[in-house]
Amino acid sequence: MKTSVRIFVLTVLTLMTAVSVNAKTKNNLKRSDAGIRLGAAFGAPLGAMPSGATGLPLPAPSLGLFYSYKISPKWSLQIGAETYSMKAKFQTPYENFEYVGNVERYINGNVNSERIDTVFLKYALVEGGKFNNRYISVPLTAHYHFRKGWSLSFGTYIGYNYKKEMIGTATDIYFGDKNDENYSLKVNGEMPFNESERIRNWDFGLNVGGNYELESGLNFDLRINTGLVDIFVKEFTAPPSAYRNLVIQTTVGYRIGGSRRI
């Protein structure tokens, strides 16, 4: 894990500990507590679907910590630190964008070439595509406890993508001159497709969900995270529209020390 990610996680955990100690000192009733969550995340990029494209979300592990502070019998605030993946498989055509990579070995057959060029790609079909973007996220949510054991939540989150992956195999490839519609050069065979670096480092968005908690502190949580920013950098012009993260998390958690609900 990168140093910046370690610092990010340690900072969040330090803040959670400091706030927790402060809350317990000021209030002998212990209006604050913490817990852990473990479960699965199902995610996919949400945007315009090109004609002929297909895709399917894949399950990925979700793990997190949370700290809650009760404002009133009906309301509480919760901050967390968690990790999850937006993992999906896809097949899609790409058209009319600038491709940066080694094409000499595929066009001229020079297998020893390490030359990197920027060329205009007229068309390619990406098969066996896979997203696997791993995030460390800090969600901040408000919980409305409408019934004993039951609550609804809504809030926001910020996430850092510490492992980006968007890979596959390109087939039926045509390069050409974007100023000449009649000129194109077909590549025989396949080329590796790897546009992982076209994905943004940061994600930001909203979350909404529901939670049920037992007296023991065991709880069940369902949450939907929807991004508000394009997951791709603006220089990546191949996608037909902006794409935003959509991740559903389903987890089982435990509130340390048992339930604090009324």
Image (cartoon, helix red, strand yellow):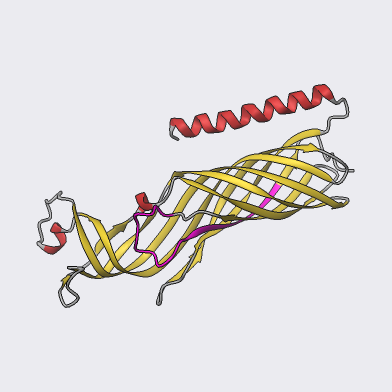
Residue 249 at what x, y percent from top left? 63, 54
Residue 4 at what x, y percent from top left? 46, 32
Above or below 30: residue 185: below
Q: Is residue 7 left or right of residue 119?
A: right
Q: Is residue 242 magenta?
A: yes
Q: Is residue 128 magenta?
A: no
| Residue pictured at 39% horizontal, 69% vertical | 91
Q: Tell how many labels.
A: 0
Residue 3 occupies quadrant = top left
Q: Is residue 237 left or right of residue 135?
A: left
Taking depth in this image into account, of 160 and 187 the one nearest to the observer is 160
Residue 176 at what x, y percent from top left? 18, 68
Task: Name, please, the residue furthest toward the top.
Answer: 25
Residue 232 at what x, y percent from top left? 41, 54
| Residue pictured at 37% horizontal, 65% vertical | 128
| Residue pictured at 12% horizontal, 51% vertical | 113
Question: Which quadrant is the N terminus positioned in?
Answer: top left
Above or below 258: residue 15: above
| Residue pictured at 56% horizontal, 44% vertical | 158
Write the start and end of the magenta stretch as one range.
Answer: 232-252
Question: Which quadrant is the C terminus positioned in?
Answer: top right
Taking depth in this image into account, of 238 and 224 the one nearest to the observer is 238
Above or below 53: residue 61: above
